[in-house]
Amino acid sequence: MRTLALVAVGELPKGFPALLIGRLEKETGMSCEVLDESVDPSAAYDSVRAQYDCRKILPLLDEIALRRGDLVLGVADVDLFSPIFTFVLGEARLGGDTGLFSLHRLHPSFYGLQEDQELLWARAEREALHETGHLLGLEHCTNPDCVMKFSASAEDVDLKPAEFCPACAAVARGAV
Amino acid sequence: MNPSTPSPLRILVVDDEAIVRESLASWFEEDGHQVKTAASGQEALILLKKEKWDLAFVDIKMPGMDGLELNRRIQELSPETTVIIMTAFASVETAVQALREGAHDYITKPFDPEHLSHVVRNTAAQHDLERENRELKEKLAETLSHPEILGTSPGIERVRKLIQTVGPTDTTVLITGESGTGKELVARGIHAASPRAFLPMVTVNCGALPEGILESELFGHERGAFTGAQYRHKGKFELAHKSTLFLDEIAEVSPKIQVELLRVLEEKKVTRLGGTQSIEADFRTIAATNKDLLMEVKAGNFREDLYYRLNVFHIELPPLRERREDIPLLAEAFAARLAASMNKPVPHFEPEAMKLLMSHDWPGNVRELTNAIERALVVHEGDIIRASDFPFIGQGNKAEGWGARSLAQVEKAHIQRVLEECDWNISQASRILEVDRTTVYNKMKLYGLKRS
């Protein structure tokens, strides 16, 4: 069985990405580990947009996946964008080996609110599981009670549970 | 797919930049939409001619045919496709021009995922509503276009043809025919065949209401117009605005209301009782009566000018006895419909039963036939309707012997039948008829009834 490797992309708040392992293992049935190595996102920085191009970070994660033969999920705390979008919460290669998400827009402080570690953790679990779902071949789901529901904002993330709906769970288990 | 997105869309992405095409396509595909891309306006037009698209994302700046021109072409070629213009901040003014030329919305690059998601969701919801609306209209039209005018006899075929001829026009129609021949059904058929079909037909039974109430029903009244008029009340003419007004039993209208009717029919303007303002109403009129309206005119009971105003197009409904060949079809159709409403299996008619139904004269026409079938459905046993399930269609009611119309004629026939049953025993007959013997004698004398 393949392992899901969690890789820090740049500096992360204390406890990340290890905090995500429990949820990911429970929901996907895969074994997860945090890699000692980390990825430096500075080459993906776009000074005009003051954001990081996630499409330039994914190839760095591809190298690790190729080397290890594992699925690799990068966890960042910088503001990510893809060329056509103002921002992205995360990006993954559908049915591929690598994905990435950022805590940046999941912090309540990003919206001018009091920082809340519990809330950040809850949101991060959902986003990590969502991007991992894409690696397992899952597309967005119409079921509002599924983590694969599309989220365009942190508020959307809060509305969905940190688990797959039965239909997506079946596909995910099959892929694992 | 986004949970609020009602259903998947067919999306066309048109942009000369590969990154935009690919990113948007994969983003939409992840949401479950069907996506194709085109690198130019020309390429997009080929796809637009070949397939139907719900949504087209069109870049405003493209070499060759630009987004503005492509938008115009899409509006001509495929007006049902919702066009969203993609633009850079610098070209917002051009995007606004595209909006004036029929584009639905514009989004600026780079796209805000939340905004883009809203645009797609709204378009999907709009398309769902439009589709639902279209389907409902089709269903409604289907329902309305088949009012149950059943029968294949030449008489009924003619009526059906007349309905189709006059239906789509705004012509005033007068429907005449005996009671129970289906005048209201024909009126509904005309309304259904008209462009007014999407609003309900407004019906007034002129014979059922006293003059004062009918007046208020037809023309409406203002608050305080008369004692008890506590609220303003819209009349049927107003309610029939953009629809059809069906005036049933028109011969029963009083001379006073006839004058008012004539005025409203001619001017297409109504003044509510107690009101001063005249209100314009765009209605189509259908009137019906079981009386010979021309005879009523000659007898001085009906205004001649109103008669001609109503009798622009005349449909005369044949009585059921003049289209006996339709009886089996009608009987079976009513039996099937009534059985369904009673939750019973659809019964068959034994040949004798059908023969009996066809031999009867049906003075109450289709209405009487329906009632007879309903009664038979209640009393019949098994899945066969027998002649014995129509006990009231007796010898005396047979077509050959049926001529009685007036109460006196019916009374005479009935007394004679009872007397014959009792072998002309007056005491026995008086018990059955529940009258005293003297009355039986008097009636026999009155009607000249004698044992032959």
Image: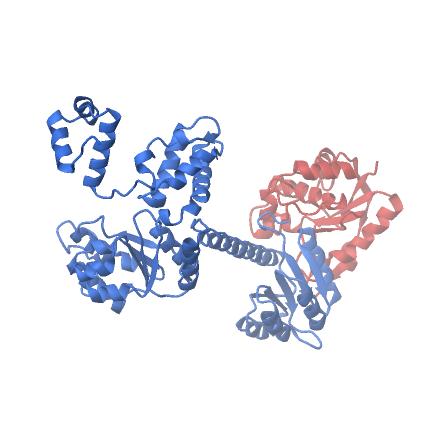
Chain colours: A red, B blue
Q: Is residue A106 shown left or right of residue B16?
A: left
Farthest residue in the bottom direction?
Answer: B64
| Foreground residue among B370 and B423 | B423
Q: Is residue B442 above or below residue B151?
A: above
Q: Position of residue B132 (x, y in %)?
A: 52, 53
Q: Quadrant of residue B251?
A: bottom left
Q: Position of residue B88 (x, y in %)?
A: 64, 70
Q: Is residue B88 shown left or right of residue B401?
A: right
Q: Is residue A108 above or below residue A23?
A: below
Q: Is residue B103 shown left or right of residue B292?
A: right
Q: Is residue B71 visible?
A: yes
Q: Quadrant of residue B241?
A: bottom left
Q: Position of residue A55 (x, y in %)?
A: 76, 57
Q: Is residue A79 visible?
A: no
At 24% from the left and 58% from the top, the residue drawn is B293
Which quarter shows the C terminus of chain B? top left
Q: Is residue B353 above or below residue B157?
A: above
Question: Count of labels shown?
Answer: 0
| Foreground residue among B384 and B234 | B384
Q: Position of residue B216 (x, y in %)?
A: 20, 55
Farthest residue in the front direction?
Answer: B452
Farthest residue in the right direction?
Answer: A67
| Foreground residue among B429 and B311 | B429
